[in-house]
Image (spheres, rainbow, N blue to C red):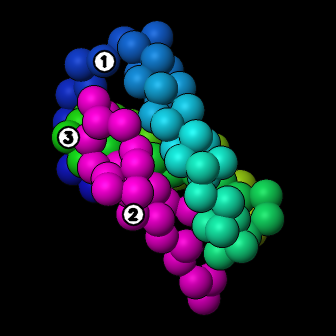
Amino acid sequence: MAESKMNATPDRVVERNIALTGQFTRYLLENPAIFSALPDAFELVIFPQNDPELQLYNLRLWEKFGREGKPVVLAHLGSTGVELTTQTPPQIYVPIAA
């Protein structure tokens, strides 16, 4: 993986991740049918489309702290500034374990 300089402070990254996780959780609660497609007790990795720095940071966190054997759900959010709705839904991926 290519190394890049991370400009964000840990506090700022936490703030951005909390906001995005809140948006994703709200979206799931407003669309409960999605829960049936998600595995139990999964690791959530958020990739905001307009924030490549946070994408890389979250990928590194998952690589470092993700628990082996625990299913992962990847959520690609269109934009950090746009509320998730049925018109702007996240893309949710559940990779199949090999």
Write down the residue under mark 2: 91
Kind of residue indicated by mark 2: Gln
Question: Which mark, residue 39?
Answer: none
Residue 77 versus residue 6 in the image, above or below = below
For residue 98, side relative to residue 85 (left or right): right
Q: Nearer the viewer, residue 15 or 5?
A: 15
Q: Nearer the viewer, residue 75 or 69?
A: 75
Mark 1 and mark 2 residues within 8 Å of each other at the beta carbon: no
Kind of residue indicated by mark 1: Ala
Residue placed at 26% from the left, 41% from the top?
79
What segment is highlighted magenta in the picture? 71-98
Q: Position of residue 38 (x, y in %)?
A: 67, 69
Q: Where is residue 44 in the image (x, y as percent from the top left)?
A: 59, 51
Residue placed at 60% from the left, 42% from the top?
25
Q: Which of marks 3 and 2 is nearer the N terminus?
A: 3
Query: Magenta includes 83?
Result: yes
Residue placed at 32% from the left, 53% from the top?
88
Write down the residue under mark 1: 8
Q: Position of residue 56 (x, y in %)?
A: 32, 43
In this view, the mark in front (3 or 1): 3
Residue placed at 44% from the left, 41% from the top?
58
Mark 3 and mark 1 residues within 8 Å of each other at the beta carbon: no
Q: State the image quarter where residue 10 is shown.
A: top left
Q: In which quarter of the image is the C terminus?
A: bottom right
Write down the residue under mark 3: 50
Residue 87 versus residue 12 in the image, above or below = below
